[in-house]
Image (cartoon, helix red, strand yellow):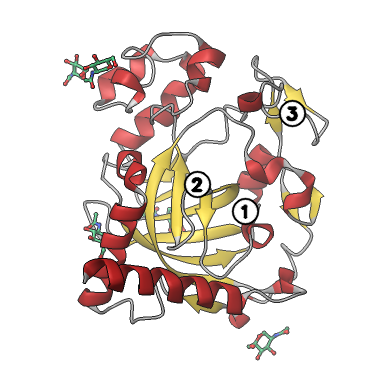
Amino acid sequence: MITITMISTLLSSFILSTALLSPGASSRVFSGQSFTSMYYDCCKPACAWPTYGSFVSGLKTCDANDQPILDDTAGGYCGGGPASSCINQTPWAVNDSFSFGYASIFIRGADSTEWCCSCYELEFLDSEIKGKKMIVQGINVNFNEDQINWFSLAVPGQADWQSQCQRRFGGTFGEFFGKNATGFTNLTQCDTIPEELQAACRWRYTWYQDVKGPNATFKRVECPAEIVQVSGCLRTDDKTFNSSSSSAIPAVSILSPTSPFATIIAVAAVLLGFPHLLDLF
Ligand SMILES: *[C@@H]1O[C@H](CO)[C@@H](O)[C@H](O)[C@H]1NC(C)=O
Ligand SMILES: *[C@@H]1O[C@H](CO)[C@@H](O)[C@H](O)[C@H]1NC(C)=O
Ligand SMILES: *[C@@H]1O[C@H](CO)[C@@H](O)[C@H](O)[C@H]1NC(C)=O
Ligand SMILES: *[C@@H]1O[C@H](CO)[C@@H](O)[C@H](O)[C@H]1NC(C)=O
Ligand SMILES: *[C@@H]1O[C@H](CO)[C@@H](O)[C@H](O)[C@H]1NC(C)=O
């Protein structure tokens, strides 16, 4: 019973996603509601590849010593190449209710070329940080997830899935990115990672209050200069997209996102279909 409903939910999401994709889609604008989580993997962010969008200037990547890599086709660190994520593409608080940051994104019905280096304003809907806002730039693609809207914030101290951060920065599991790379559990542990990562690690326990997977609304905004200054990435449509033509994308499926039944089914689908996502929180 659950399985059949689950499959039909996944199927309807897939059909919707397919139906929404159309040629010349680059000017489409998205908003909606999303799940959120955190990640940190030291790989080359997908949006740094030139094929992931139309950019005035591309997303910066860095070598293992955090020196900029100028070639956007340079191989990714997790595939044995030199290009890793630059250390400063991590969150910082502007004041108690507003932060900037970077995210790995999936938006249902959209193509990664539409969110790469787009900026979104997030407003958290629940938990201790309800009402707080962030503006994040999409730097990566949630390849793990393709059924629900998902913003995963890049925050050092989160699970180091492929042990590539351990390779890049040294250290051991348990001392570096949490016991068995499952991520940190308290603020004190931020003292144990390289100094240049510590401020962003502490952001999680201070501004973000270490909440687990808050939900948020998202809407596309023009990228603030502060964000572009750090990431280097600017889309060709960043000044020209029409925010009032925004398509609202429900978080999970074509069923009403406010229906508790739809939510339960969608969450069950996610938990059963993508168990590894649980560990991202
Ligand atoms: C926090 O900063 C944001 C962005 O600059 C601003 O819009 C907001 O008014 C500020 N809030 C407070 C409480 O200072
Ligand atoms: C960490 O991994 C080791 C080796 O696989 C295992 O023996 C240990 O129980 C794990 N610790 C935790 C806290 O999961
Ligand atoms: C933080 O977590 C580490 C690892 O689990 C533990 O050894 C340490 O006592 C904790 N510190 C505090 C202040 O809770
Ligand atoms: C986010 O929404 C899901 C589905 O409605 C819910 O299960 C979860 O508890 C929410 N997260 C928080 C932190 O409240
Ligand atoms: C933006 O989109 C809205 C809604 O589709 C439309 O009414 C408006 O004319 C558009 N503005 C521009 C400048 O294209």
First in sequence: mark 1 or mark 2? 2
First in sequence: mark 1 or mark 3? 3
Q: Which residue is mark 2?
A: 100
From the viewer's side, name the closer residue of 147 and 214: 147
Quadrant location of the C terminus in the rendered image: top left
> What is the number of the mark on residue 224?
1
The 10 Å Cα crowd at callout 2, few under 14, some 14 to 19, many 20 or more, is: many
> What is the number of the mark on residue 75?
3
The image shows residue 245, relative to residue 130, as above or below, that is below
Disc 2 Cβ-to-ligand 1 distance below 8 Å: no
User: What residue is rendered at 36% in x and 45% in y?
Assistant: 277
Q: Disc 2 and disc 3: Cα gap in Å? A: 28 Å
- Mark 1 or mark 3, whichever is nearer to me: 3
User: What residue is rendered at 49% in x and 9% in y?
Assistant: 170
Q: Amino acid at mark 3?
A: Gly
Residue 260 is drawn in which quadrant? bottom left
- Tell me whether circle 2 and circle 3 mark residues in contact (CB < 8 Å): no
Left or right, 192 with reference to 153 = left
Secondary structure under badge 2? strand
Q: Amino acid at mark 2?
A: Phe
Q: Disc 1 and disc 3: Cα gap in Å? A: 29 Å
Quadrant location of the N terminus in the rendered image: bottom left
Image spot of residue 28 (x, y percent) = 66, 74
Secondary structure under badge 1? loop
Q: Amino acid at mark 1?
A: Pro
> What is the number of the mark on residue 238?
none
Image spot of residue 176 (x, y percent) = 38, 15
- Tell me whether circle 1 and circle 2 mark residues in contact (CB < 8 Å): yes
